[in-house]
Image: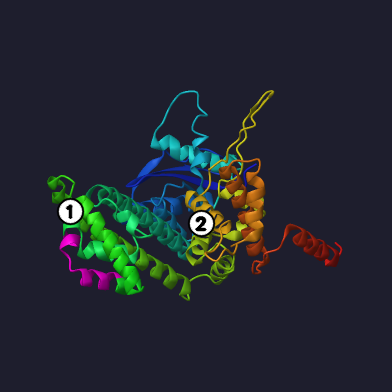
Amino acid sequence: MSQFLHDFVVGIDVSSEFSVVAMLAPSGELIRKPFRIDHNPAGFHKLLDILKKEEERLQRKPIYFVESTGIFHLPLFFFLRSNNLKGFVLNPLSVHSTKNFDLRKVKNDSKDAEAIARLAKYQDVKVSLVPEPQILALRMMTREYYALSDTLTEMKNRLSTDLYLLFPGFLDVFSGAFGKTALAILKDFPSPRAILAADTDSLTSLISKTSRKGTAWATKKVNQLKDCAQLASSMPHEFSWLDAKIKVHIDGIESMQASLDGVVTQIQAMIDSELFPADAKRHIELLDGIPGIGFLTAATLIAEIGDFRLFKSAKALTAFFGLDPSVNQSGKFQGDRNKISKRGTRIGRRILFTIAMASIRTTRKGDEINPVLREFYAAKCVNKKKKVALVAVMHKLLHYIFAVLRDQKPFEIRQPEDHQSWRNTKLRQAPAA
């Protein structure tokens, strides 16, 4: 049974420019026909006046519910909350499941607003609060970082394609085709003709200074570049008209990298601010101490998780990230090839995948980042596909994250048998209930 069964419930169907509002009295009757409000000061105050009047008439404070629609529901949500009204956000999957109750196929904003209100009033659905503004701002900034990062990757891929055609062999000269040295060369000498015409000593000096390596190494790279440029001269002359594309790509990559650095600086400033919640700051510090997790990934995880107190178990956290297994069963049939649900935070899964990959690797010196997870991954790969084994590592990581945030203690690497011994000791020392 819903906890809002006897309340004055308001359902709001939100779009980008306007919303449609449906109000249900404590008895469940529709108070008036659903009405539209525009997303401007006049529309917001119109809704507030109507809600205040109905509150006086019913002697009940309204509780409003909105469907999560990207960012479009946030201005109205915060406006109502700033006027001392209580509100919750509903998962779109839950709302969608109620839109087929009627036998007739009717789909419009008024029906959707009423469906939201009735779902909240009569169904025992999970509701959520919008995170604190500081956490919400952090979430938007971290998501912006990864959006810009994807754009940068696309730019680099396009440059690689052009270099493959216009400057064959260049990508094999340097270990990092988009490292500081390679980009510096392409910026000053964006074509094979420019490399052939360049003064050898100047080119050697540029490579040596940028890479911070010796002259001998730089001389070797210059000779390789000259050979590549000579090879490119056999390409059709008309391709030289496309040399300007390389310069355009270099300018775009440098600009995008500067934007990424600016976003990281802003994220750090937000977290260092006195206004940022102390518990969230502590959570980021704790996650940053787990091998394979860095500052940015820790900040992203906390931004996606929001209020950790809402998660009562590691299983709940796993479901939030969409790593829980889907169920495929009907009658006597029981599916045995169930995939993860992928119903949780997409960015969160992306970050966990990155952390899992980092956790099972070794450093340049051969040291294991996380020997326990690396051994666990290798054992899983014996009879599982690598992707399946990697998902198992992601599951383990979520259990680590939950335990660290729950206990508020730094992460420690323990072998499974050592951890079991430690756990048994803790259980023996725990006072009897």
Is 243 left or right of 56, judged from the image as shown?
A: left
Q: In which image quadrant can residue 256 be found? A: bottom left
Expressed as whole percent of the image width and height from the top left, the position of residue 343 reads 53, 43
Magenta-tinted stretch: 194-207
Q: How many labels does the image show?
A: 2
Is 115 left or right of 35, judged from the image as shown?
A: right
Work out whether 293 lies above or below 115: below
Q: Is the magenta stretch mostly helix, strand or loop?
A: helix
| Residue at 57% from the left image edge and 44% from the top image edge | 386
Question: In this orientation, which residue lies closer to the viewer: 72 or 196?
Answer: 196
Mark sitting earlier along the chain (2/1): 1
Work out whether 164 lies above or below 248: above
Task: Tell me the tag on residue 304.
Answer: 2
Q: In which image quadrant can residue 312 be found? A: bottom right
- Residue at the disc numbered 1: 243
Magenta span contains residue 196: yes
Q: In which image quadrant can residue 339 be found? A: top right
Marks 2 and 1, how far apart in space?
Answer: 43 Å
Secondary-structure class at tag 2: helix
